[in-house]
Image: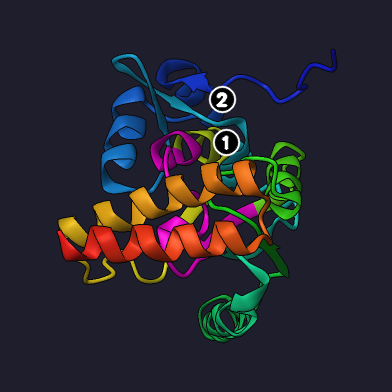
Amino acid sequence: MKKSLEPSPMRVGVAAHTLGLHPVTVRRWIKEGKIRAIRVGNEARIPAAEIARLMGVQHNRAVLLYGQVSGHDQQEDLQSQMETLVAWAKRERPEQQIVELSDIGSGLKANRKQLRKMLSMIQANQVDEVVVTYADRLTRFGLEYLTLFFAGYGVRLTVLHPNEGKTPEQELTDDLIAILTSFSGRLYGLRSHKQKELVVRIGEALQAT
């Protein structure tokens, strides 16, 4: 099994010594957002990539734009997502390298081809920031774990529309439909008429409650 060669995040004291700063200064900068850190238990740890950034080491890390839809009938939505992301990147990150990735597949699945490519690029220290239109384009569940993973490599996650304007009931309905769609796809096949009909009926039933 191949092991990651990525150095472990540094304790504040070690990071302070490496950067030639006092630990109090490092802690203050973490609170002020000048230094990106992750929590390990009750301690703050600073990723190696963040130490390199503070020391002026340039890796030409890219801004990664990611779009996702569940099915091939949502191509227009996917195109709209990517156009929104590209327009944002040209306006907000004009000097950085931009990489576009997109998947057609359930947001519940971790084996999406381009999502796996994203994670590999992050582990290879090639990504500075991941940008999505909505958080559920990245994953339906477990966003906090992905965010923690990103932070461990000094990668920022930017969600252009963090509040979709949905009520808690609507969010729950969407999550239930996503789960049932995934399971019905396994039972009937993703392109079967029965699967599509079941999803429609489930959606109607949930919205009527």
Q: Position of residue 135 (x, y in %)?
A: 42, 58
Q: Nearer the viewer, residue 170 or 85?
A: 170
Q: Does residue 140 appear in the picture of this structure? A: no
Q: Nearer the viewer, residue 2 or 205?
A: 205
Q: Which mark is first along the chain, 2 or 1? A: 2
Tag in front: 1 or 2: 1
Q: Quadrant of residue 65?
A: bottom right
In the picture, measured across the screen, residue 42 lies left or right of residue 167, that is right
Q: Position of residue 33 (x, y in %)?
A: 33, 48
Image quadrant in which the N terminus is located: top right
Task: Determine if the magenta segment contains residue 23.
Answer: no
Circle 1 crowding by C-alpha within 10 Å: few under 14, some 14–19, many from 20: many
Image quadrant in which the C terminus is located: bottom left
Task: Give the residue number, with chain letter if any, for mark 2.
Answer: 18
Residue drawn at point x = 28 percent, y = 56 percent: 173
Q: Which mark is residue 183?
A: none
Q: Quadrant of residue 154?
A: top right
* Badge 1 vs badge 2, beta-carbon distance below 8 Å: yes
Q: Position of residue 200 (x, y in %)?
A: 42, 66
In the picture, measured across the screen, residue 9 lies left or right of residue 115, that is left
Q: Nearer the viewer, residue 59 or 71?
A: 71
Q: Please provide the residue range marked out in magenta.
A: 128-147
Q: CA distance from mark 1 to mark 2?
A: 8 Å
In the picture, measured across the screen, residue 188 lies left or right of residue 124, that is left
Q: Which mark is residue 51?
A: 1
Q: Does residue 200 appear in the picture of this structure? A: yes
Q: Amino acid at mark 1?
A: Ile
